Amino acid sequence: MLTQLRNIVQSVAASSDLDQALHTLVQQTCVAMRTECCSVYLANAEDQRFELMATQGLDPSAQVSMAFGEGLVGVVGKRAEPLNLAYARKHPAFKPFPSTGEDAFQSFLGTPIIYRKKVLGVLVVQQHQPRQFDESEESFLVTLAAQLAVVFAHAHAQGGWQGASSPVLLEGMPASPGIGIAQAWCDDSQPRLEEVAPASHLDTQRELDRLDAAIDDASTEFRRLRKRFDKELQKDALAIFDLFVHLLNDPMLREDMTVRIQQGDAATWAVRQTVEAFSARFAAMDDPYLKARAGDVKELGQRLLYFLIAPAGSPPPISTPIVLLARELTAGMLASIPRALLSGVVAEEGAANSHAAILARALGIPAVMGVSFSPAKLHQKTVILDGHKGVLMIEPAEALINEYQHLVQEEASLQSTFETALAAPGQTQDGTRVEVHLNAGLSADSQIAINQGVDGVGLFRTEVPFLMQRRFPSEDEQVKQYRAILASYPDKPVVMRTLDIGGDKPLPYLSVEEDNPFLGWRGIRFTLDHPDIFLIQVRAMLRASIGLNNLKLLLPMISGRNELLEAKALISRAYQEVSQDAHQAGQSINIPLLGIMVEVPSILYQLDSIARDVDFLSVGTNDLTQYLLAVDRNNARVADIFDALHPSVLHALASIAAVGTRHQLPVSVCGELAGDPVGASLLVGLGYHQLSMNTRNVAKIKYLLSRLPHERLVMQANQMLALDHPSEIRAATEAFLAGQGLEALVKIGQLR
């Protein structure tokens, strides 16, 4: 039967559309299993129903739709396991559908079609004579369904098999919220680094001149883009273009390319090798923000390649609104299309934290990253881009388009409402103060907005300069960068995390191989083993704060009090050195407040003893959740287990907040949970009064809190501690927020 199994799967995969694929499936399955009936039901997740899509043996004109859990098919889907019955009618869940003509069939064998824990449909075979299908038959159908799941999912992801009653849905990562409705426009005009073949040259100076010219041209382009967006973007977002110019002229990047050319490589091949090497360093990292820097380096390489190759001609002009589809989204693409004609952007590669995505958010352009698509099949077809859910709908029905157009109008009104809370202090309806801070990673990042609506920077990552070079940045180089950040917030605190490097974020000039880098030599473990590096960084931070005195120090990956005390001794030493130099120069410096990241589970049991050694605590919910649940959130097979609303995580958060209350110690949260309406409301209810988040969530969260009484938040959070599943906690909290008149905020981007 293995040959028959392979033939069915290959025939289905070769089908031109979904209808043909399903009819091929039921016909060939009937023949292979010698049954009198085979039917396939597909899941409609939006309506929560199974729909009969193809049959061999039932009336093909019958329209059958049943709710999840309804009938025998519903039982198979709900239990996600096969159901084998000799007398189907005797099963308590049996539900007749007379229009199908199934009255004549007695036996029933159904198995779910499952892909990554998601039930895509149910495959059923039936017989007139009552009999139990034997073990080999059941095994055949289960194996067939398992292989079909992969075929279905792949075809779905490629936008193929169109022609079903529902629009094709392509899934990706939400990168910029909002809805875009227009024709898809595929841009494949950009040269690709991976297509550059190895090449040598005969004239070194000519290739060096070509490289210099390309760098100059790319720098000029980024300056032009900055000017192009001057009136549309805030100063902080515009600084992204300054960053690109800075990186283009980075001596390490330039030297690497120059050396390769001097060794005989053509300029194009030198650019590819250098960019891929630098990009790979970031791509291998676990931290989503740092991982996204790989795309920024690659974008620089793409622009250099563009000017080195100088492709002839230009793409046709765009005169009507479009949703732009590209392999990779670049700032140049966003600038080349008038804002009024750009309804949204979709990229096959890239991350939600890339600078292109950040620009899209700053411009208010809906965006989805990581969507696998076929340009030839999608070009100029009507699409709906949902930036909230991270999906692209191909050729939707008119009724669905109308619903989404109504949603666009609602969102515009809602965003205006949120912004009314931006200038006011962060607080609950009854006046309980809740500080709202920003998470950030680069001075040029739009998340470092000089925004009167925030109370400071709750987390500044310091890793990027260390990762971009072939050596440790000098103390003076670090002082310059840290000073720029601190000076941007002269009257507000800036929490700088010391170097969180090593393990999954290896330095290119300090090679370390580990079997399990996530639990390895990283964070404070690395810097305590290299006190010279730690002292230089702390000295740089202290020097940068002279005259500003708004620096707060944060130590990552603390797993025990011994690490904290060792770090404090080094910080004290650095302070003595810097303060002595400052005094001699007629300057004064305050010793900064010191805190630790609460992210390693072991530290939870030492917080009471540690409380006397620190000035504040900062909870990194992303890593804390990952370590508590023993799950890699970047592993697609287990990523669905990662949920910061897991009861164990909530109880841990409650205990951390209680420590802060007992010791009158400020406790903040700087993970993604703080920017989620459900998460923020629960955190405040658990006792947190400082939340740090990305810029795009600030107005929304401040508005949310201003509409909720603190007492009710405390009651809700305590009730959630009694629940056993993340989905129950989210559903109950969403219902609570809806009851407070905030349903529109919770349901942003969802059809009514």
Image: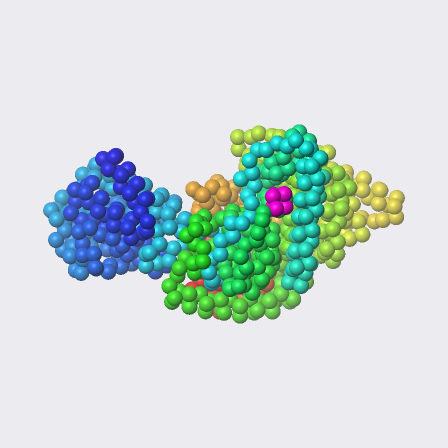
> In this rendering, does residue 462 appear at all?
no
Q: Quadrant of the N terminus?
A: top left
As rendered, which of 474 and 369 lies closer to the eye? 369
As rendered, which of 81 and 111 lies closer to the eye? 111
Image spot of residue 385 (x, y percent): 47, 58
Image spot of residue 149 (x, y percent): 33, 45
Image spot of residue 144 (x, y percent): 28, 41
**Magenta-span inclusion, residue 689:** no
Q: Which residues are magenta?
A: 305-310
Q: Name the residue rendered at 49%, 56% in the picture.
A: 185
Q: Quadrant of the C terminus?
A: bottom left
Relative to 727, is 752 above or below? below
Name the side, left or right, on which 625 lies relative to 23.
Answer: right
Q: Name the residue rendered at 25%, 34% in the picture.
A: 2
Q: How many marks?
A: 0
Image spot of residue 427 (x, y percent): 61, 64
As rendered, which of 617 and 632 lies closer to the eye? 632
Magenta highlight: main SS: helix
What colour scheme does the image use? rainbow
> In this rendering, does residue 518 appear at all?
yes
Relative to 568, is 744 above or below? below
Quadrant location of residue 490?
bottom right
Name the side, left or right, on which 8 lies relative to 716.
Answer: left
Q: Name the residue rendered at 66%, 59% in the picture.
A: 228
Q: Name the residue rendered at 63%, 54% in the picture.
A: 447
